[in-house]
Structures are given as structure tokens and as C-alpha cells.
Amino acid sequence: MFHLLDIIGTMAFAMSGALTAMHKRLDPFGVFIIAFVTAVGGGTLRDVLIGRTPVGWMMNLQYVYVIILGFFLAIIFRKKFDKLRTSLFLFDTIGLGVFTLIGLERGLLTGLHPVICIALGTMTACFGGVTRDILCNEIPTVFRREIYATICIFGGIVFFGLRKLNLEDDILYLVTSIVIISIRLLAVKYKWYLRAFEHK
């Protein structure tokens, strides 16, 4: 289940990056680069911080193949995504839930404190999107009023709470990712925002 979620998250973020780049009218090479950094940016930062080098995608070409597949799928079916922003949001939300979980698990395998694991999970989920937005000349979603990183932190708390119940790993992974994805969808639907500071 963990490996499957990892692949799903990589694919989702690759397509999210590709759709953003196409929306910005980049050329095919630019679209691929944005797809790539969106998919591996958070994981690369996480691996460097915990001293896991070479980083994951360099050791396993399966991730590169998945990103390439996501890139081509986004291009081939771009006209099917008639509501580009909706498609982008859905892929980004799936990636957010899955990559938070992956960061949490990597932190546990390294023997880190739960608080640090939650920080790693948040970085893993958000940093690829931050890099994508910066390269596409957008203010990163994580820095705007929209609830984004906060959901990852909450998901991490849920993860460690459920872990104390000694649930099977597959159930723990699935429930945590569903909680994060569901809260993100509800936050957008019901317009839950963090209040921005106002300059007077």
C-alpha cells in the first residue's frame, strides 16, 4: 500500500505540475521540467535533510518513468480537462495527502521525533508545489490564505493518533491520506481560509 500510494502521489503531482505549466503556455520542455520538480521537489528536500543520499528518484528510475507517463497523459488528455483549474486542484489534493504520509513514514524509519516527522511530511507534500508556483511566477499556495500546509500538519497529528490504536499499516496509510484529501476538498468547498494579515 505504501509503495502504491507513493506512485499515485508522484503521478498526481507530475500531472499537477504539467497542467500548471500548460496553463502558463510553456513549451514542452518547460512543461516537463515543471512536472518533474513538482513531483520530486518535496521528496528531494526531505531526503537531503535526513541524509538519505543519493535521493530516492536517483536510486529508483521507476519514479522517473511515472513522471514521464504523467507528463504525456497531461498533454494527451489536456483537452479532456475542460475545467483546467478543477483538474489541477484534484491532482494537487491527491498528491498533498499521499506525500504527507510518505514524509511521515520516512521520518519514522529514520527514528525521528513525531514533531519532526510531521514537519518532514509537510515539507514533502508542499515543497514541490512551492517550487512549481515560484517557477511559474505565482505566489505559492502554501503562503496564501488557502488552508494547505495546515492540513498536512493536522494529517500528521491524525496519523500519530491512529498509530496509537495499533491499526494495520495499510489501514493507517489509507485513513490518513483520505482525511487529508477530504479536509482539503471541504476547505475549498466551504471556503475555509486562514485570515491574512492586512497592511495598514
Image (tube, helix red, strand yellow):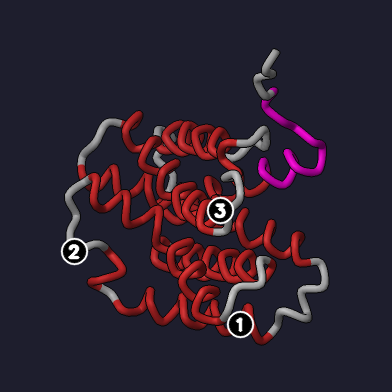
Q: Name the residue located 60 percent from the left edge and 68 percent from the top edge.
A: 21
Secondary structure beneath label 2 = loop
Q: Tell me the kind of residue under disc 1.
A: Leu
Secondary structure beneath label 1 = helix
Residue 7 seen in render: yes
The reply, left or right, for residue 159 in relation to residue 27 is: left
> x, y (%) of residue 80?
78, 80
Q: Tell me the kind of residue under disc 2.
A: Pro
Residue 172 seen in render: no
Which mark identifies residue 73? 1
Q: Earlier in the sequence, mark 1 or mark 3?
A: 1
**In front: 130, or 165?**
130
Q: Residue under label 3, please give it.
A: 133
Q: Residue under label 2, please give it.
A: 54
Which mark identifies residue 117? none
**In front: 61, or 182?**
61
Q: Is residue 147 above or below residue 168?
A: above
Secondary structure beneath label 3 = helix
> x, y (%) of residue 46?
31, 49
**In front: 73, or 181?**
73
Q: Quadrant of residue 55?
A: bottom left
Circle 3/circle 2 CB separation < 8 Å? no
Q: Residue furthest top?
A: 200
